[in-house]
Image (cartoon, grey):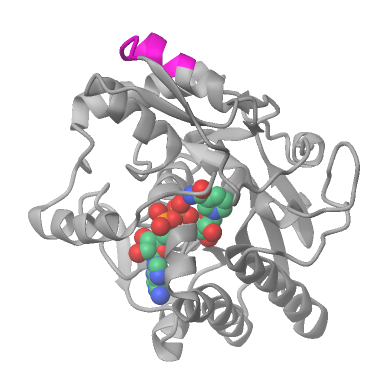
């Protein structure tokens, strides 16, 4: 199947491209920049902006499905420029849905986030049918808006869609300022790791190559017009992240700082539907995933691999703009 991957040059998208190929599909990247993780001749790429109606339509043409991942994914970038975040995350998603409608694309798979469960009134475990509250964060507002557009395009015009709510991804190619990379870097430099509050706050991480397999599973017939959480079942505390990094990299000191007021508290999220209906589970234990990240860093020194000089320059600019990831 020929599959357009918007944001295919990014952290998650580049792994999705790899897993699509491993599953025998033909990925095409649509992104502002070439992938720093692939040789240019290896993956068909359309360089363009989601905001460009003609570019999105041309990119979509001839594909059977679209996996839509391009977004402002860095919450700090969203806060710094909410108008741009809306243009890319909301309007850009509508551009893709519109292009898919006009080109009669069979399936649009949308990369959302478990942040949509923030503020949920539900006590206990959350699943895909849990009520979603109005969001307090602009990033979440844009991602929920994207889900809403997927749903209403589907209702009005037909065409299948799949919404995937990602847990917190980590692993090779992660942005340097995300929590795991930041802790690893500090430990490598022999610096103390700072934990906000008591460090007992937990997140459901998902190893990025597992996540990419789950995204590919979003193309299955069983995923049509469904919502799935793609999360690791394991709850990992910030303290555990620090301890894992200290064990794998260097036994640097721990320092406790004040709790971050902006932390979004979300209850435990069930991954049961993806397991039952798609046969997908996040298999990689957290410690093993961090080990693979550390190994990848040792081989690449944190730089993109298999890239030519020009695409490295492009990605470096991207990386510099990305100050921190979702946590
Ligand atoms: N990283 C996370 O913590 C996380 C968690 C949950 C969900 N998500 C979602 O997963 C998706 C991928 O996130 P990521 O971490 O890989 O992000 P990323 O920033 O690594 O990749 C996003 C890609 O989109 C491209 N892009 C941005 N604006 C574009 C535009 N106007 N036109 C075309 N391409 C454009 C960027 O160049 C980049 O390659 C996003 O939709 C994000 O909201 C991310």
Looking at the rendering, which quadrant does residue 143 occupy?
Answer: bottom right
Left or right of 70? Residue 280 is right
Q: Dividing the image into four equal quarters, which quarter contains ligand 1? A: bottom left
Residue at 60% across / 68% down in the picture? 138
Residue at 32% across / 42% down in the picture? 176
Q: So how many labels did they put on this image?
A: 0
> Closer to the camera, 137 or 271?
137
Q: Is residue 94 above or below residue 116?
A: below
Left or right of 135? Residue 94 is left
Residue 194 in sight = yes
As drawn, the residue found furthest toward the left would be 309
Residue 222 image offset from top left, x and y in percent = 77, 50
Q: Is residue 147 above or below residue 205?
A: below
What kind of secondary structure does the magenta stretch mostly adopt?
helix
> Closer to the camera, 252 or 204?
252
Residue 93 image offset from top left, x and y in percent = 57, 75
Residue at 52% across / 49% down in the picture? 326
Residue at 47% across / 84% down in the picture? 57
Looking at the rendering, which quadrant does residue 259 occupy?
Answer: top right
Q: Is residue 244 magenta?
A: yes
Looking at the rendering, which quadrant does residue 55 occupy?
Answer: bottom left
Left or right of 244? Residue 149 is right
Residue 44 image offset from top left, x and y in percent = 31, 62
> Closer to the camera, 156 or 164?
164
Q: Is residue 129 above or below residue 196?
A: below
* Magenta segment: 243-252
Residue 26 in sight = no
Q: Is residue 240 magenta?
A: no
Q: Is residue 121 above or below residue 268?
A: below
Q: Quadrant of the C terminus?
A: top right
Residue 322 image offset from top left, x and y in percent = 34, 56
């Amino acid at each position: 199947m020929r599959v357009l991957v918007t944001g295919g040059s990014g952290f998650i998208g580049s792994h999705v491209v790899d897993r699509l190929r491993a599953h025998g599909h033909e990925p095409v990247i649509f992104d502002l920049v070439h992938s720093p993780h692939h040789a240019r001749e290896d993956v068909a790429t359309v360089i363009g902006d989601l905001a460009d109606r003609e570019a999105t339509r041309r990119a979509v043409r001839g594909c059977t499905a679209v996996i839509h991942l391009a977004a402002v994914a860095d919450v700090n970038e969203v806060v710094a420029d909410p108008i741009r975040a809306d243009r890319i995350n909301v309007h850009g998603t509508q551009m893709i849905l519109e292009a898919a409608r006009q080109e009669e694309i069979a399936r649009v798979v949308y990369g959302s986030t478990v942040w949509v469960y923030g503020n949920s009134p539900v006590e206990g475990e959350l699943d895909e049918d849990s009520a979603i509250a109005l969001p307090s964060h602009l990033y979440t507002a844009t991602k929920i808006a994207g889900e809403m557009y997927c749903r209403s395009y589907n209702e009005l015009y037909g065409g299948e869609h799949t919404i995937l709510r990602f847990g917190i991804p980590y692993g090779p190619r992660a942005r340097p300022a995300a929590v795991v990379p930041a802790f690893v870097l500090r430990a490598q430099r022999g610096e103390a790791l700072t934990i906000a509050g008591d460090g007992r706050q937990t997140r459901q991480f998902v190893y990025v190559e597992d996540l990419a397999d789950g995204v590919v599973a979003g193309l299955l017939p069983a995923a049509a017009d469904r919502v799935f959480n793609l999360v690791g079942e394991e709850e990992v505390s910030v303290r555990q992240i620090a301890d894992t990094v200290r064990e794998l990299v260097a036994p640097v000191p721990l320092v406790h700082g004040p709790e971050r007021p902006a932390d979004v508290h979300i209850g435990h999220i069930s991954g049961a539907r993806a397991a039952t209906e798609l046969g997908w589970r996040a298999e990689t234990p957290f410690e093993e995933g961090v080990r693979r990240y550390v190994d990848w860093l040792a081989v690449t020194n944190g730089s993109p691999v298999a890239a030519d000089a020009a695409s490295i320059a492009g990605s470096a600019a991207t990386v510099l703009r990305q100050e921190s990831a979702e946590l």
